[in-house]
Image (cartoon, rainbow, N blue to C red):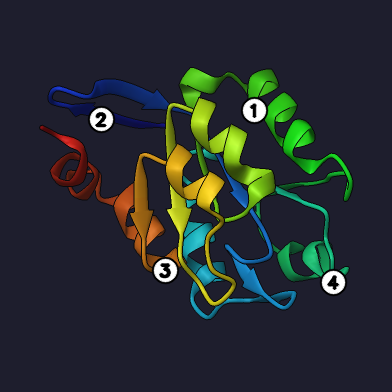
Amino acid sequence: MIEVDIPSFRSITIENVIFDYNGTLAVDGKLINGVKEKLKELCKKVNIYVLTADTFGTVRENLKDLDVKVKIISKENGVVDKLRFLRELGEDRTITVGNGNNDSLMIKESALGICVLEREGISTKALLNSDIVVKNIIDVFYMLLSTKRMIATLRE
């Protein structure tokens, strides 16, 4: 569990983190360097879910040794699938991390929505719906594992 009180923003207690896969944890279906190690570390604090249309067909193989739950979503209706899954877990207990149009609604409705600028870029819908934008996925892990960074970014 991650607990953080952000002055003039909100107090949050996080049980779950939902990650998009391609463009967020991976590029062209391959995990970004350092992600596997950081996922192992974060798994000790929260439940981790990876939601993806799995464009490259690699997600299960790449994450097989980790304590993360993978859910394959529809290629045609991913934005709705991701939002529905977030609501099942509980928006107020979940942080979402993504970069694309199909992440935009889950980013908007979660307790905290984080956009990641990796080599795939960020959609404007996801960007405008996010609470925080970071330059790479490893920065997301540092923020989640050291919540003072989150406080410094979001307090007024």
Image height of 155 relative to 29, above or below = above
- Residue type marked 4: Phe
Where is residue 38 shown, x and y percent of the image? 46, 64
Q: Which mark is residue 4?
A: 2
Which dot, 4 or 2, sits closer to the camera?
4
Report, in whole angstroms, how far the alpha carbon at label 3 lies from the one at label 2: 22 Å
| Residue that carries the numbered disc 1 in the rendered image | 86
Q: Secondary structure at mark 2?
A: strand
Image height of 155 relative to 19, above or below = above
Q: Residues within 10 Å of mark 2 (few under 14, many from 20)?
A: some
The numbered mark, 4 or 3, whose residue comes first in the sequence reads: 4
| Residue that carries the numbered disc 3 in the rendered image | 136
Q: Residues within 10 Å of mark 4 (few under 14, many from 20)?
A: few
Where is residue 119 shown, x and y percent of the image? 54, 77
Q: Residues within 10 Å of mark 3 (few under 14, many from 20)?
A: some
The one nearer the camera, 151 or 147, is 151
- Residue type marked 3: Asn
Which dot, 3 or 2, sits closer to the camera?
3
- Residue type marked 2: Val
**The C terminus, quarter of image:** top left
Q: Secondary structure at mark 4?
A: loop
Q: Quadrant of residue 36?
A: bottom right
Image height of 137 relative to 10, above or below = below
Q: Quadrant of residue 87?
A: top right
Count all numbered tags in the image, as a single digit. Answer: 4
Q: Is residue 150 left or right of residue 39?
A: left
